[in-house]
Image: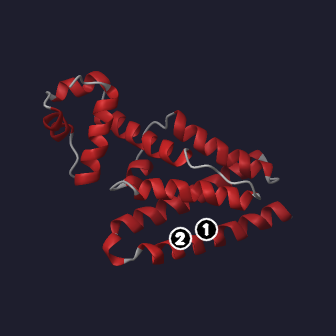
């Protein structure tokens, strides 16, 4: 097999899904790919750069989900739920996203789309940025907790709890757009 950035990324995602972030190492990845560790650095200059690429892939998965027509809370909820589902599809996906060092084009486009949606709802640019931060902080925190305690809660219960909290955040944001 020819070593390419895509092959390294696919193998890294598979290894992360199997072992989790704490057990992931470039040495294990190199062994899996039957190469020396240095060969990985030809494609990704560091472990963090590789993990950033994994985060980019997770965001790309979320961004592929169509956003329905509707009012801004419905559209924002669809974006948030899509990213949560993409994070949950990967072991430690939320931590990988949160620990991203250098957001790439997918992550930047995602956050810019969310900010634009909020600005379109009548928020000024600074408020839209703050609101997007609140929404993504809630998403990240809830999902990290959810993945850390995955055996403690059924997915349906976690979905209900997540939706409740998201609705609370939206209720607060609505007061901003309605004033």
Relative image position of residue 145 (x, y in whole percent) = 41, 67
- Compared with residue 44, is residue 160 higher up or lower down, i.e. above or below? below
Q: What crowding class fits label 1: few (fewer than 14 Cα within 10 Å), some (14-19), or many (20 or more)?
A: many
Cα–Cα gap, marks 2 and 1 = 6 Å
Decide if residue 21 is in sight here.
no
User: Percent position (x, y) of residue 51?
Assistant: 35, 40
Callout 2–callout 1 Cβ contact below 8 Å: yes
- The residue positioned 72% from the left and 49% from the top of the image is 117
In this view, the residue in front, 10 or 177, is 10
- Residue nearest the viewer, comparing 70 with 147: 70
- Secondary structure beneath dot 1 equals helix
Q: Which quadrant: the C terminus? A: bottom right
Q: Secondary structure at mark 2?
A: helix
Instruction: Residue 53 in the image: state x and y as whole percent.
Output: 39, 36
**With respect to residue 37, does 97 lie above or below?**
below
Q: Which residue matches tag 1?
A: 166
- Name the residue rendered at 68%, 47% in the picture: 115
Residue 52 in percent (x, y) is at 40, 38
The reply, left or right, for residue 72 in relation to residue 77 is right
| Rendered image quadrant of residue 4 | top left
Indicate the colouring scheme.
secondary structure
Residue under circle 2?
162
Q: Is residue 125 above or below residue 1?
A: below
Please state the total of marks drawn on the protein image.
2
Q: Is residue 119 left or right of residue 48?
A: right
């Amino acid at each position: 097999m020819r070593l390419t950035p895509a092959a390294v990324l696919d193998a890294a995602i598979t290894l992360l899904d199997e072992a989790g972030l704490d057990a992931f190492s470039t040495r294990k990845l190199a062994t899996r790919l039957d190469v020396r560790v240095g060969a990985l650095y030809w494609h990704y200059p560091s472990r963090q750069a590789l993990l950033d690429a994994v985060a980019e892939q997770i965001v790309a998965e979320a961004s592929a989900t169509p956003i329905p027509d509707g009012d801004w809370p419905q559209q924002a909820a669809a974006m948030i739920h899509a990213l949560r589902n993409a994070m949950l599809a990967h072991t430690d996906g939320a931590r990988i996203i949160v620990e991203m060092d250098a957001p790439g084009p997918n992550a930047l486009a995602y956050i810019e789309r969310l900010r634009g949606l909020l600005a379109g709802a009548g928020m000024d640019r600074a408020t839209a940025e703050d609101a997007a931060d609140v929404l993504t902080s809630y998403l990240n925190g809830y999902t990290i907790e959810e993945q850390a305690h995955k055996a403690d809660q059924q997915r349906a219960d976690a979905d209900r709890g997540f939706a409740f909290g998201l609705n609370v955040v939206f209720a607060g944001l609505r007061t901003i757009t309605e004033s």
